[in-house]
Image: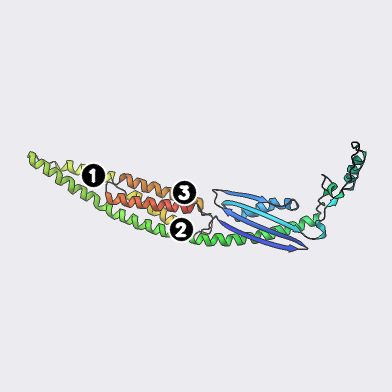
Amino acid sequence: MIRSMTGFGDARCNEEGVTYVLEMRSVNNRYFKSNIKVPDIAQHVEPQIEKILRSRIARGSVSLTLRIKNESVTAAYVVNHQALSSYLHDLQKAELPAGVSATVDLATLVTLPGICQFPDVTDDQRVQVTRIVCDIVDRALEDMANMRAREGQVLYEDLLENCRLMGDLIEKVHARAAVVVEEYHDRLSNRVEELLSKARLDLDRDTLCREVALFAERSDVSEEVVRLRAHIDHFVELCGSPEAVGRKLDFLAQEMLREANTIGSKSNNADIARSVVDMKSLIDRIKEQVQNVE
């Protein structure tokens, strides 16, 4: 079954006083594109996140945001005592203007560059973060996949209904095209006989037959009707496929439009022309909906 490219999923986890919150959004895009935002402590997991996304999503622009809140003692920054001593030493050597006094505020000192540093991440912490992040990415993807599948069901029903209506119009065009040549023959024969009767001339029946045959060849849309039917059958078949078929459906919609345009250019009948207009309207709707299919 086809899937929509639009979806949202989230997942969270709390382990050892650390809370992980992940949100994921996907929107339409011709190809796969990812935008991953993670804290510094999880930067090493980004290539694995990208790999997981590519393995599960074929088409669409995916935005992933990970937030980590550490409420444990490991969240404390490390004070660089050497840098702090260096700042204090330089401040003590500073010469102030006469009559000016100053005090050193420790709270201000710790905001200076290099004083407070995030503690180094150990190998065990890296392994733990990787495990947790990959797990919540999987769960968020599953959540988003369910939403994309639900929207895909709506797209599936709408596309099939449009294909059904297209099939009705094709049968209408096919039935009408079968009698257009006969009507043209009758009109041409009556008109020629009317004109020649006034001039008292004989009509060469072979000439009339050749003219009707040329008209029949120019207005024959049987090949286009057959191809259009085949495109619709293939389109419906792909809609039921479990694979990502959005680009194939887009190509078939373009081919449908090409065949409809050819039928319109060949037709010399008002009823067929109106049916072609209705066809092209349906194809435009199909093309618009296909832009949402993965």
Horizontal placement of 157 versus 118: left or right?
left
In the displayed structure, 85 sits above or below 12; it is above
Mark 1 is surrounded, within 10 Å at the Cα level, by few (under 14), some (14 to 19) or many (20 or more) other residues, namely some
Residue that badge 2 annotates:
237
Quick one: label 3 or label 2, which is nearer the N terminus? Answer: 2
Image spot of residue 131 (x, y percent): 73, 59
SS for tag 2? helix
Where residue 41 sits: x, y (%)?
76, 52
- For label 2, the crowd category at 10 Å Cα-Cα, with few meaning under 14, some 14 to 19 and many 20 or more, is few
Residue 25 figure quarter? bottom right
Residue under pointer 1: 213
Please report the residue visible at 52 percent of the width from the left and 60 percent of the height from the top. 151
Could you say where residue 40 lies in the image, as x and y percent from the top left?
74, 50
Give the residue number, with chain letter if any, for mark 3.
251
Indicate left or right for 134 with 158 as reference.
right
Nearer-N-terminus badge (1/2)? 1
Type of amino acid under label 1: Ala
- The amino acid type of the residue labelled 2 equals Glu
| Residue contact between numbered discs 3 and 2, judged by CB atoms under 8 Å | no
Please state which of residues 101 and 207 is positioned toward the viewer in this rendering: 101
